[in-house]
Image: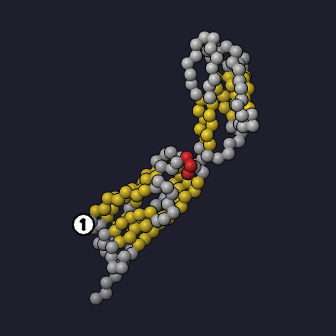
Amino acid sequence: VTSTTQAPLLGSITNAVVRPDEMLSFRIYASDLNGDQFTIGLDPGAPAGAIITNLVRNFPVPATNTTFHWRPSRDQASTTNIITVRVTDDGGPPLSSLQAFVVTVLDYVEVSVGSTNLQRGQTVSIPLSLASSDGVTNLDFQLGWRADYLANPALTIASPAVGAATLLDQQTNLAISL
């Protein structure tokens, strides 16, 4: 009598594209035709924060309800990540199957404008901040306000090497170019 043991089976995993700070989650399917119990995990080199959660069923045939989760940080923006998932059974000898997939984390640009309350006759500064995962070039945007909201608006660029700004339209719109 000849006995053949087979490696566990791992379902297909597709490549993905995700934004920084956005959760990527999907199911990973695996089974073992020999009835061996198995575990699923990430091989070394997976990006920081990537995890797999396992819920394994052993009856009537071992199967799994396994989920991959990763929320890339802004520090991981503009990266391409090759991630390898491995399923290993407890047979004699233990056998494994693996699959690599690619997750591309997009760039990000965040512009924020501070806010404040202002009473008639007061002077105020409102910060404008820009954060980016990659060098920013040719970024243009405008801020507008009603003509009766502000009298005599003035514009000061804190870092002229970074960008320029001008007042437009009878001083009711601010055009910023970086």
Element carrying mark 1: loop
Relative to residue 33, is residue 146 depicted above or below?
Answer: above
Nearest the camera: 165 or 28?
165
Q: Nearer the viewer, residue 142 or 75?
A: 75
Left or right: 43 with respect to 135?
A: left
Quadrant where the N terminus sits is bottom left
Against 112, is 152 above or below? above
Query: Which residue is painted at 48% across and 49% down in the image?
Result: 71
10 Å crowding of disc 1: few (<14), some (14-19), many (20+): few
Q: Position of residue 120 (x, y in %)?
A: 60, 11
* Image vertical order of residue 3 relative to residue 114, above or below: below
Asked if 134 appears above or below 117 in the picture, the reply is below
Q: Where is residue 170 shown, x and y percent of the image? A: 72, 17
Question: Residue 92 at what x, y percent from top left?
Answer: 33, 79
What residue is drawn where x is 60% and y is 51%?
78
Residue at 53% in and 61% down: 82
Q: Quadrant of the C terminus?
A: top right
Residue named by callout 1: 60
Whether residue 146 is visible here, answered yes or no, is: yes
Q: Quadrant of residue 115?
A: top right
Query: Is 21 on the left or on the right of 91, as rendered?
Result: right
The amino acid pointed to by label 1 is Pro
